[in-house]
């Protein structure tokens, strides 16, 4: 039964991470034209940073050296892209510099949409994996009742 719960833990952590990734992408898309932020300057694109974390503690991993350890996903940080802002010539814009250029966010909407589709499909795959695990667990319980 422990293996079922480990599988659920892995899928649940991935669902949580992908949800945060989709929220971050949505924020990037919503701020694609934001030229002023509280920090000053244009909005900076954000990316979540994921890390693989073992599902079991160190002692149990040592005991089962021959097994392939499972890893779940952990969001370590959400970082701002350090790329330069896009300079767009709009002399009538209130944030234009002396030459008439406006520093626009470094958000590429096409790239963000592709990232959103990828995150959405990864989320769906993890929902399916979670459902398969649940079905296997239910079938194992049914076998035990017979």
Image: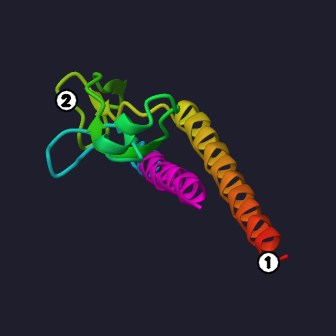
Q: Looking at the image, tell me whether mark 1 or mark 2 is earlier in sequence order.
A: 2
Q: Furthest-left residue in view? A: 39
Expressed as whole percent of the image width and height from the top left, the position of residue 109 reads 53, 36
Judge by depth and name the residue closer to the eye, 143 or 136: 143
Q: Furthest-bottom residue in view? A: 145
At horizontal 19% and vertical 39% (from top left) the residue drawn is 41
Residue 128 located left or right of residue 116: right
Relative to residue 123, is residue 92 depicted above or below? above
- Coloring scheme used: rainbow
At horizontal 43% and vertical 44% (from top left) the residue drawn is 73
Expressed as whole percent of the image width and height from the top left, the position of residue 104 reads 33, 33
Magenta range is 1-26
Residue 21 located left or right of residue 1: left
Label 1 sits on residue: 145
Relative to residue 98, is residue 9 depicted above or below? below
At horizontal 53% and vertical 54% (from top left) the residue drawn is 15
Q: CA distance from mark 1 to mark 2?
A: 75 Å
Relative to residue 1, is residue 40 depicted above or below? above
Expressed as whole percent of the image width and height from the top left, the position of residue 91 reads 30, 31
Tell me, yes or no, whether the highlighted magenta stretch contains residue 112: no
At horizontal 76% and vertical 63% (from top left) the residue drawn is 135
Residue 25 located left or right of residue 48: right
Asked which secondary structure carries label 2, the reply is loop
Label 2 sits on residue: 97
Asked which secondary structure carries label 1, the reply is helix
Residue 146's quadrant in the figure? bottom right
């Amino acid at each position: 039964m422990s293996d079922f719960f480990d599988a659920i833990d892995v899928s649940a952590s991935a669902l949580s991470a992908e949800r945060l990734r989709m929220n971050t992408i949505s924020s990037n898309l919503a701020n694609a034209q934001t030229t002023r932020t509280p920090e000053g300057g244009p909005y900076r694109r954000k990316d979540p940073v994921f890390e693989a974390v073992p599902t079991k503690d160190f002692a149990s991993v040592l005991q089962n050296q021959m097994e392939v350890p499972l890893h779940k996903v952990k969001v370590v940080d959400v970082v701002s892209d350090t790329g330069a802002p896009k300079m767009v010539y709009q002399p009538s814009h209130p944030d234009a510099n002396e030459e008439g250029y406006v520093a626009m966010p470094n958000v590429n909407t096409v790239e963000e949409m592709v990232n959103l589709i990828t995150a959405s499909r990864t989320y769906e795959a993890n929902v399916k994996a979670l459902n398969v695990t649940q079905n296997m667990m239910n079938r194992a319980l049914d076998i035990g009742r017979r």
